[in-house]
Image (cartoon, grey):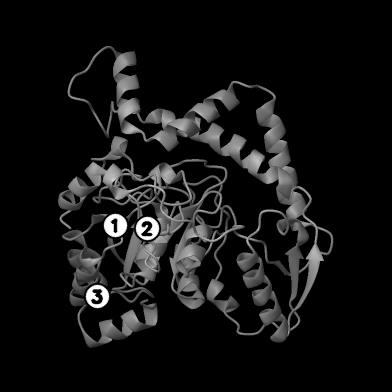
Amino acid sequence: MITVSQTLEDLRNSSAKKVISQCIDRIEAGKFNTFITVAKESAPEAANISGNSKGPLAGVPIAIKDNISTKGIRTTCASRILGGYVPPYDAHVIERLKEAGAVIVGKVNMDEFAMGTSTETSYYGPTLNPWDTKRVPGGSSGGSAATIAAGEVPLALGSDTGGSVRCPASFCGVVGLKPTYGVISRYGLISYANSLEQIGPIASNVADMTLLFNVIAGHDPRDSTSVPGEKDYTNALVDDVKGLTIGVPKDYFGDGIDQAVEKSVWNGVHRLEDLGASWQEVEMPHTKYALAAYYVIAMSEASSNLARFDGMRYGLRLEKDHDWHTTYSEIRAQGFGEEVKRRILLGTYALSAGPAIPTTFRLSISFTYLSTRSSASPDVRIPLLTPGLCSHLSILRTQYPHWILHLGATGR
């Protein structure tokens, strides 16, 4: 893997344009289908400008998940329905990255509209796990984590609704963070479930991840949920856990957990204990309701948010138009994948169910409150991310004939 410090050393010994060109060469030589669009023209041009920047990421290449708006660079959400969409504006995080001197080298693969946990639902085919190409890299930000693990780029951005940064970071052996809601602006993030999702940084190590987080976090008046104020998160990089109290939720351990996963978690807890921390069990009794609450909220918001994709203003448009209703239906039928259709149907049903929605939102608020004020109030908690190891690929590449076309379409 590549670190930011290594990249900055390369930049001191060479030009930013050369470092970016070498990065693009690594991406194009890759065998893991990590990228959907490679910025072969705009990245070297941006390198000429960023090379003179005084920002903390001057000349450093970064990969962006394909649901974050990038002006002039195709943004598809890994869906056929947005195949030709090029945003006319940058997301807030992209503006901050450019101010810091970072160079966007392309858009990485993901589950279609961030709906999935394996990066297998992408219209452009599955991303492969660099550690074992027969296994999934996690999702939905699988391309973001896999490109870091493959040593193609030192930094990447993902988005996390219900584990979509944390899961692939775990499966690919890198570091990812889902920040507190509102710390990073959602302006320019194409919505799936807007009350749950956040943009998150991914890197090969904690220090690089924190540096990236420090750049993209901060208030944005264009996002009504953005938290006011600025903070230097790099001050938290202290190599000392003495006196820290760690909470281990006992509700996360039980039926269904793989023994290897449980052992790994406890090894981590005991390692921190050896370094001076202490641990205690805590209760999170509402955990059993979390998945049900997530599905009602996320599917309902997805049904509403994805209603805008109709092919009338941008994206997929079929050769022959009919009446509005038929055209709208055919575009969505051919433009969306099966998983997206399932979630839209579930959400539409939930929205028509009446009392289920306010009840679920109350449960979500209650769950959030109680999870932060559980029995013993430790300093931090170590929850279980996933109960099992990363699974094997369940979709064969032969089922994706358009994936082969994609390789030529992007110039790879």
- In the picture, the disc for residue 143 is 2
Q: Nearer the viewer, mark 2 or mark 3?
A: 2
Dot 2 alpha-carbon crowd within 10 angstroms: few under 14, some 14 to 19, many 20 or more: many
x%, y% of residue 374? 80, 57
Q: Amino acid at mark 3?
A: Gly
Reading the image, the residue beneath label 3 is 51
Q: Earlier in the sequence, mark 2 or mark 3?
A: 3
The answer to whether residue 311 is visible is: yes
Marks 2 and 3 sit apart, C-alpha to C-alpha, by: 26 Å
Q: Amino acid at mark 1?
A: Phe
Reading the image, the residue beneath label 1 is 35
Residue positioned 71% across, 54% down in the render: 255
Q: Is residue 313 left or right of residue 93?
A: left
Marks 1 and 2 sit apart, C-alpha to C-alpha, by: 7 Å
Is mark 1 in CB contact (under 8 Å) with mark 2? yes
x%, y% of residue 409? 16, 48
Q: Nearer the viewer, residue 345 or 67?
A: 345
Q: Earlier in the sequence, mark 1 or mark 2?
A: 1
Q: Nearer the viewer, residue 296 or 307?
A: 296
